[in-house]
Each structure stands twice: as C-alpha cells, then as structure tokens.
Amino acid sequence: PPILDRVPQQQRGGLIALVVEDHYVNVVTERGKTLVLMRLADAMRETGSVPGLQVHRSHWVARAAVVRAHRSDGKVLLQLSNGMWLPVSRSYLPAAKRADLI
C-alpha cells in the first residue's frame, strides 16, 4: 500500500494499524512503528487494498491483524497480531460487528 512508501525500508512489512499521536500517525507494521506527519483520514486513504476499518477516532486496524476481541465493563478492545490492544468506540461498534471483528 502507498502508506508504506512513507516508512523506512527496514520497518516495512505487513500493515497492522494506524494510530494517531498528536498531529502524527503511527504506522504500525509487522516490523515496527513509524511516526508520519499526516492526518488519519489521509493515511487511511493510503492503505490501498489492505482490508481494514476505523474502529475509533484515533485508530484504524487491518482486518487480518485482529486476533481477538475482548469485552470488559462495557468496553470493547481488539488484540492485534503484534500484541497491541486498541479500543473500539461506541460509534464504530456497528461497523466492527458488520466486519465480524467482534
């Protein structure tokens, strides 16, 4: 996907997630993380053909990277293949259910 052109060669690998940090997007791959100065909406457009979805105003996940979902105290968390846990906000919950992530 085009987003990986913004990542150093040694960090390029399968796309796992996009995570917002201040004005940056942390591009998370199988080989690590790289901060890129851009908006999440622009980064999501650059994921190309990688199937995924936004699960929070600050998080996008690749569908293949989701290992399991966990519910606790009314909150839903997704565990990713690299061990990260990301929240699913209530407004994105229906889309996550339709995508069979939950």
Image: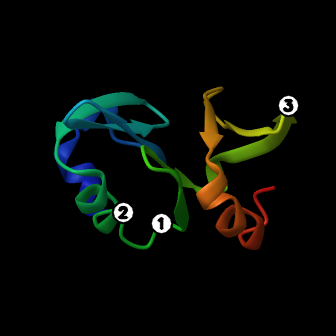
Real-space CA distance between mark 1 and mark 3, rounded to the nearest whole angstrom = 29 Å
Give the numbered dot on residue 68.
none
The percent coordinates of residue 84 (x first, y second) are: 61, 28
Q: Amino acid at mark 3?
A: Ser
Q: Secondary structure at mark 1?
A: loop
Give the structural element (helix, strand or loop) at label 3. Answer: strand
Residue 70 shows in this picture? yes
| Amino acid at pointer 2 | Thr
Residue beneath disc 3: 72
- Quadrant of the image for the N terminus? bottom left
Disc on the earlier residue, 1 or 3: 1
> Are the residues tagged 1 and 2 within 8 Å (C-beta)?
yes
Q: Based on the displayed image, in which of its 4 quarters is residue 7 positioned?
A: top left
x, y percentage for residue 23? 19, 36
Q: Mark 3 Cα within 10 Å, few/some/many (few <14, many 20+)?
A: few
Identify whether 94 is placed above or below 29: below
| Picture residue at 54% right of the left edge, 68% below the top | 51
